[in-house]
Amino acid sequence: MKHEVILSGFGGQGVMSIGKNLVEAGVEEDLQVSWVPSYGPEMRGGTANCTVILSDERIGSPLVEYPSEVVVMNRAALAKFGPHVQKGGIMFINSSIVPDKVDRDDVKVYYVPCDDIARELGNPKVSNMVMLGAYVAATKVLKVETIENMIHEMFTGKKAKLVPLNMEALKRGIACVEG
């Protein structure tokens, strides 16, 4: 089992957080992991992407040219990484921002209205959690329970009040691919 993922969008969309969450959950589930961030000239608003590898075997190189999955949070990400997804791979598109339809019949595509769902939940910052839920549900590479436990660990003390919101965002993302 080996999942090579490129996650991409604007800085501030939580792309790096999704990647870090995947890697931390992978460690929790005893997988071999790799996380390589890449930023554009500006952090917030510039381009941001990261490469994540989750594998049950040793990872030879953290570089990924043809990912098995791509998470696209904006149009530029679709143009840059969409053509490189492996045949039989999966694409996750933030359909709130990316109106384009994927013109490939050799990949599975999930259109997830991340930003719309986050706004419905009252906090635009949880759009990444919506996408994380969709990714985990569709790929089944990680257990949903592991992600839920991580949410509880991430938000403690004064931030504990954010747990229900993030859990709901995760569940709404799951429903986008299971419903």
Image: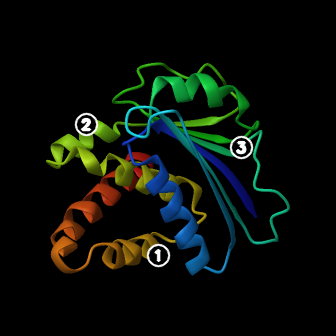
- Amino acid of disc 2: Asp
Give the answer, above or below, for where 30 lies relative to 170.
below
The colour scheme used to paint the residues is rainbow
Q: Which residue carries the number 3 mark?
A: 67
Label 2 Cα crowd, 10 Å radius (few <14 / some 14-19 / many 20+):
some
Residue at left 39%, top 78%? 149
Q: Which residue carries the number 1 mark?
A: 146
Q: Position of residue 157 (x, y in %)?
A: 20, 80
Q: Position of residue 133 (x, y in %)?
A: 42, 56
Tell me if 82 is positioned left or right of 117 in this view: right
Which of 99/60 is in front? 60
Q: Secondary structure at mark 3?
A: loop
Q: Secondary structure at mark 2?
A: helix
Residue 175 makes an appearance in the image? no
Residue at left 73%, top 40%? 88
Which of 44/151 is in front? 44
- Amino acid of disc 3: Pro
**First in sequence: mark 3 vs mark 2:** 3
Tell me if 129 is positioned left or right of 75 in this view: left
**First in sequence: mark 1 vs mark 3:** 3
Which of 16/115 is in front? 16
Q: Which residue carries the number 2 mark?
A: 116
Label 3 Cα crowd, 10 Å radius (few <14 / some 14-19 / many 20+):
many
- Amino acid of disc 1: Thr
Q: Measure how far apart labels 3 and 2 are at the Cα level.
A: 27 Å
Residue at left 51%, top 33%? 41
**First in sequence: mark 1 vs mark 2:** 2
Farthest residue, direction front? 41
Give the answer, above or below, for where 59 lies relative to 120.
below
Q: Position of residue 76 (x, y in %)?
A: 52, 24
Q: Measure how far apart labels 1 and 2 are at the Cα level.
A: 25 Å
**Occupied quadrant, residue 27:** bottom right
